Image (cartoon, rainbow, N blue to C red):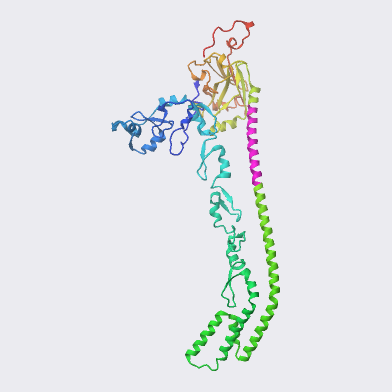
């Protein structure tokens, strides 16, 4: 017989402390604590305590942070106490020792979880070895952004809140980080912009330049007919209509100037300077209007020029008649475009409203899913309780069927689930509450080589009526389903062991046989310990002498004269 190590049978691994600290939160000891449990560096509850030569205590992580590799630093507590003996108050790695005495004292301290929304309570040993690293409310760093988020909310954070989560741009459909949404909006080529000149909305960024240069009705243009005033495109047609006389006069003036220069060519001197000035004048006119320059080069006689002027005047008169019709058609097209833009804007607003409604419905669905998950968990808990009541025995015996054993052993080897608890059973209706605990891959000295089987006392409703410590004989049996060689081990409880004291938590530390059966013998086909991948465990607990504490029928005899020892 051997006591099970701790409650899990393996050495606990301390989880990483919060950034910048080494110890546990002082809130875990709700009923108060001795100041010696405080780390002299981080001022939190000691984690893996070490004691210095000067007597002060530190977390192991804090020592590594303070001393590094081979460093020596003065003790802060000694400085505060004004201790001047430098040899006595200097900290170094070779003078730091594990403080097992304080560790044992802390192990028995009533403890609660300090993480928000967690209601776990127990003792420090269980908190340190099991709960802290498995608490669903323990902050975990987000793999993407590094933010500390409660384990139960980590998936929601990654899907809905993380600034580094990947989303799609609503405009270009490219994949971006949620936190870079505004930065992307400043350079997205599909992002809709507003033209500051005409106040038109919804213009993609890549089209804005073309809009300003070719489409915007408020873009600035110069009148090609010699006017000096600055015009916008939406007023240009009106300007052409209103200034038709001035524009015609300007054209006539330009034509007459050309005519005069051409007529002067035959009587001009042949001097080089005169020819150069004429060439310069002709080149200047070509830059103003390519069309007129080409016409000038084709003309060789003054009569032809006069005919050209007449033709130009006729064309101007014809344009004067056609322009009102063209203006009317252009206005109709502009009105049609405005109507189309108005409808498109209304469609965009409707799409935004539908998107908002979809988001609201999605949030409602997620809330319902969370509610259903909570209800499912509650139903599962009730089912477990009903199963426990269904298999409960009240005669001090337990016949425990363990099916699908190979999978359970694989889970134990991988560390996923190292042990299994049986349903509770009782020595009587008013009796001790007990269960069995099995390690499919062994525990303690039997880990990896033997099947380990333990007996566990549980906190029951009638513990105050029963004698303590527990003294009933316990027999453990693994049934050979070929009825050749059952494996049996029995023991009487050690009254000094904490495993048999009255439980102060849900379960005492288990006690039993870490080397109950070699695993090689378990799978030996010569025996029937495993049949159809199923084994049967039977537990017998002696119930002699318990009736006088639980059967209060005055017709059967005198009641106990004194309360049972606690």
Corner quadrant of residue 407: top right
**Residue sitting at 68 percent across and 83 percent down?**
314
Of residues 40 and 333, which is closer to you in this image?
333
**Residue sitting at 63 percent across and 43 percent down?**
363
- Residue 174 locus on image (x, y percent): 58, 54
The boundaries of the magenta stretch are: 358-384
Q: Is residue 305 above or below residue 503?
A: below
Asked if the magenta segment contains residue 380, the reply would be yes
Corner quadrant of residue 464: top right
- Residue 304 locus on image (x, y percent): 63, 90
- Residue 303 locus on image (x, y percent): 63, 91
Relative horizontal placement of residue 518, taking residue 347 as reference (left or right): left
Residue 294 appears anywhere in the view: no
Dominant secondary structure (helix, strand or loop) of the stretch shown in magenta: helix
- Residue 271 locus on image (x, y percent): 48, 92
**Residue sitting at 69 percent across and 73 percent down?**
326
Corner quadrant of residue 490: top right
Q: Is residue 446 above or below residue 366?
A: above
Asked if the magenta segment contains residue 402, the reply would be no
Label count reads 0
């Amino acid at each position: 017989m051997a006591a099970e190590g701790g409650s899990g049978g393996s050495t606990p691994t301390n989880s990483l402390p919060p950034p910048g600290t080494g110890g546990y939160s002082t809130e875990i000891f709700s009923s108060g604590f001795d100041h010696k449990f405080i780390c002299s560096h981080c001022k939190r509850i000691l984690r893996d305590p070490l004691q210095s030569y000067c007597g002060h205590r530190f977390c192991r992580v804090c020592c590594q942070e303070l001393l590094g590799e081979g460093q020596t630093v003065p003790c802060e507590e000694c400085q505060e106490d004004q201790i001047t003996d430098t040899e006595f108050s200097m900290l170094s790695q070779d003078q730091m020792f594990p403080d097992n005495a304080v560790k044992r004292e802390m192990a028995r301290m009533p403890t609660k979880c300090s993480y928000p929304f967690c209601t776990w309570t127990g003792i420090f040993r269980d908190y340190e070895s099991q709960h802290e690293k498995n608490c669903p409310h323990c902050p975990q760093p987000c793999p993407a952004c590094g933010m500390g988020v409660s384990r139960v909310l980590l998936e929601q954070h990654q899907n809905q809140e993380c600034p580094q989560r990947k989303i799609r741009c609503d405009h270009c459909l490219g994949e971006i980080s949620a936190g870079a949404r505004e930065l992307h909006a400043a350079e997205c080529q599909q992002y809709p912009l507003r033209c500051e000149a005409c106040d038109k909305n919804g213009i993609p960024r890549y089209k804005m330049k073309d809009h300003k240069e070719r489409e915007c009705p408020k873009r600035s243009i110069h009148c090609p007919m010699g006017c000096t005033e600055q015009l916008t495109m939406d007023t240009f047609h009106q300007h052409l209509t209103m200034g038709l006389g001035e524009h015609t006069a300007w054209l006539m003036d330009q034509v007459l100037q050309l005519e005069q220069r051409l007529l002067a060519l035959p009587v001009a001197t042949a001097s080089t300077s005169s020819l150069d000035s004429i060439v310069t004048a002709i080149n200047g006119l070509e830059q103003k209007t390519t069309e007129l320059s080409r016409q000038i080069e084709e003309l060789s006689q003054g009569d032809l020029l006069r005919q050209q002027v007449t033709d130009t005047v006729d064309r101007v008169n014809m344009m004067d008649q056609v322009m009102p019709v063209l203006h009317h058609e252009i206005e109709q097209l502009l009105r049609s475009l405005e109507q189309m833009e108005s409808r498109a804007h209304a469609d965009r607003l409707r799409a935004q409203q539908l998107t908002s409604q979809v988001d609201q419905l999605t949030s409602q669905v997620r809330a319902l899913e969370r509610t259903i998950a909570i209800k499912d968990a509650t139903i599962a808990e009730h089912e477990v309780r009903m199963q426990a009541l269904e298999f409960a025995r009240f005669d001090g015996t337990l016949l425990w069927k363990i099916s699908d054993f190979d999978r359970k052993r694989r889970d134990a080897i991988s560390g996923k689930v190292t042990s299994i608890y049986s349903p509770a059973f009782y020595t009587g209706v008013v009796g001790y509450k007990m269960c069995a605990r099995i390690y499919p891959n062994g525990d303690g000295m039997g880990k990896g080589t033997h099947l380990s089987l333990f007996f566990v006392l549980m906190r029951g409703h009638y513990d105050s009526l029963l004698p303590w410590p527990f003294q009933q004989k316990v027999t453990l049996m693994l049934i050979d389903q070929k009825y050749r060689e059952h494996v049996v081990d029995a023991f009487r409880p050690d009254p000094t062991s904490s495993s048999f004291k009255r439980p102060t938590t849900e379960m005492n530390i288990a006690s039993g046989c870490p080397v109950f059966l070699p695993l090689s013998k378990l799978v030996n086909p010569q025996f029937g310990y495993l049949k159809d991948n199923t084994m049967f465990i039977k537990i017998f607990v002696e119930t002699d002498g318990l009736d006088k504490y639980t059967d209060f029928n005055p017709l059967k005899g005198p009641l106990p004269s004194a309360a049972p020892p606690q």
